[in-house]
Image (cartoon, rainbow, N blue to C red):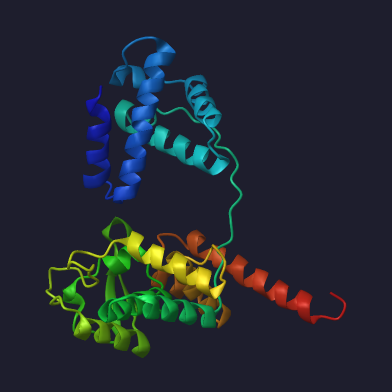
Amino acid sequence: MDELPILYAAHLTRDRRRSVHTVRAYRATAVRLLAFLRNHWGGAVDRAALAKVTPADLRAFLAQRRGEGLSNASAARELSAARDFLNWAGGEGSAPRLKAPRVRKGVPRPIAPHEAVALAEEVGEGARVEWVGKRDWALLLLLYGAGLRVGEALALTGAALPLGETITVTGKRDKTRIVPLLPPVRAAIEAYVAASPWPAARTESLFRGLRGGPLSPGVIRASVRSARATLGLSDRTTPHALRHSFATHLLGRGADLRALQELLGHASLSSTQIYTAVDAAHLLDVYRHAHPRA
């Protein structure tokens, strides 16, 4: 049975095209669920047994996990992963239906355009090596100017060169999309490529680390943490917040929701609609501060 989580992870990677982070999290849930059921039932667990897991069994598993300090959001994710594993191991439809904990949807917190540029400048100027500063400036401008996820930007290779008016991005589940590339963003990337000591080979990462390997997302996150402290920006000012800002600012300027969905690479429109709440929140904030009777 110890092989089941491994086989499940292979299925998620090969057949479902899930991200590395999702596969790691779902496999960990499968391991925890199997360990719980062995103890809960007092014996070995096989595929036949997994097909007979009851709602009471699943509730007991969640209760144990909640006792370990899981929030509602984490418990909901744990339940979703557990049910997915059970459907895979015991056959589609074998996982018991169970109502997930209610999760209050948070509204993304964008940052102002001048703050986005100031953040990128601070990160770029704070680098000890000149070409690294150009790299970080180009990367953060790309996140804000094109709405890319950090992983999408770091997955770009030298094959993206020479740059044109658009760039092809590979998003979640290997879905590709084409996004416009603003002239300042294009110029920043070209300046970085020209200054980089590493050749922009077609099969190599476009954004390189100090030693020439692929740039780690942790490096850019650490630089942003330092820069936002210097600028006095909120802790919510992260590389991913630049993507939120891209979406919010476009919507605020009249962008079509369907077009925004394509630019962001969202599979469903419901994922994009959250930005309408952001825009409405901004309008209400302006109203309360501007109206004499507010």
Whether residue 83 is situated above or below residue 272 in the rendered picture:
above
Q: Is residue 5 left or right of residue 250?
A: left
Looking at the image, how many numbered discs can be counted on the residues? 0
Which quadrant, please, contains the C terminus?
bottom right
- Residue drawn 54% across the image and 63% down it: 236
Q: Is residue 43 left or right of residue 235?
A: left
- Which quadrant of the rendered structure holds the N terminus? top left
Q: Quadrant of residue 35?
A: top left
Q: Nearer the viewer, residue 56 or 36?
A: 36
Residue at point 30% right, 82% down?
Answer: 166
* Quadrant assignment, res 199: bottom left
Residue 94 % position (x, y): 39, 27
* Residue 156 appears anywhere in the view: yes
Tell me the quarter of the picture where residue 9 sits.
top left
Q: Work out which residue is located at the far top of the displayed protein and give it.
A: 42
In this orientation, which residue lies closer to the viewer: 33 or 55? Answer: 33
Single out the residue that lies furthest toward the right: 293
The image shows residue 276 at horizontal and vertical percentages of 59, 68
Q: Is residue 257 visible?
A: no
Query: Residue 71's spot in the image, x, y percent?
Result: 56, 40
Q: Residue furthest front?
A: 128
* Left or right of 191 in this view: 235: right
Nearer to us in this view, 169 or 268: 169
Q: Position of residue 131 (x, y in %)?
A: 26, 80
Give me the residue at 44% from left, 78% from top: 122
Q: In the displayed structure, would residue 262 be above or below residue 19?
A: below
